[in-house]
Amino acid sequence: MSTEWSPDGADLAIAFVHARTGVTAQVEVGAAPRRRRSRRSREDAQEWSGPAAGPRDPVSARSVLDGLVNDGGWAGRLAVHTVTGRWDEVAGATLAEHSRIETFSDGVLTVRCDSTAWATQLRMLVPVLLQRLTDEAGPGVVTSVLVKGPDAPSWVRGPRRVKGRGPRDTYG
């Protein structure tokens, strides 16, 4: 029988660490590792919520965003901006091609048209357009639609001007 040492198990691991690092430490083989204390105290521990929905259960991002929008009072404005982003669907492709939304303020939607003919056409369709906007954005969000024709050039220059009709036989 030889008296040579043959490492195996924990002795092999200690010999490997000693060979790699040069650190010798006395490790008690078979000792249970010490457990760390939990950071939570028993008073903070919550009970299981059970099969019903609880406050710690995961929720969808849509429900979180809907709650944020409703709490902030942004639901009406968000609905209007959603409708303005889909103006060609709400007004129709042909009408949307010749009109654009300028502003929305205090329930009044201002629409600018390319020509006076298209502005007249849109003015006749305001009741139908208001119904579509109510269906899309919700009741009471858009109260009226103000239709404007194309912009004519302004001949007013500077802070002082002479009152009068301006240039004649040009746009009249």
Image (tube, rainbow, N blue to C red):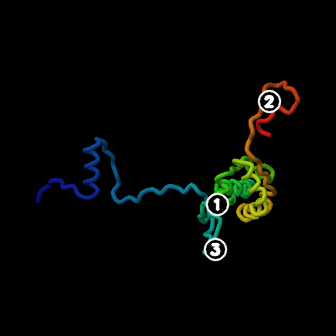
Decide: is 145 above or below 170: below
Residue 34: x and y, percent?
45, 56
- Mark 1 vs 2, N-terminal side: 1
Disc 2: CA contacts within 10 A as few (<14), some (14-19) or many (>=20): few
- Mark 3 vs 2, N-terminal side: 3
- Mark 3 vs 1, N-terminal side: 3
Residue ID for mark 2 = 156
- State which mark lies toward you, 3 or 1: 1
Element type at mark 1: helix
Disc 3: CA contacts within 10 A as few (<14), some (14-19) or many (>=20): few
Q: In which quarter of the image is residue 133?
A: bottom right
Residue 150: x and y, percent?
73, 44
Tell me the kind of residue under disc 2: Val
- State which mark lies toward you, 3 or 2: 2
Q: Taking 2 as reference, is 110 left or right?
A: right
Tell me the kind of residue under disc 1: Glu
Q: Residue 89 carries which label?
A: 1
Residue ID for mark 3 = 52
Total residue callouts: 3
Q: Quadrant of residue 45?
A: bottom right
Give how far apart the Cα atoms at labels 1 and 2 are: 39 Å
Q: Taking 51 as reference, is 168 left or right?
A: right
- State which mark lies toward you, 1 or 2: 2
Residue for point 81% across, 51% down: 106
Q: In front: 151, or 28? A: 151
Residue 114: x and y, percent?
69, 47
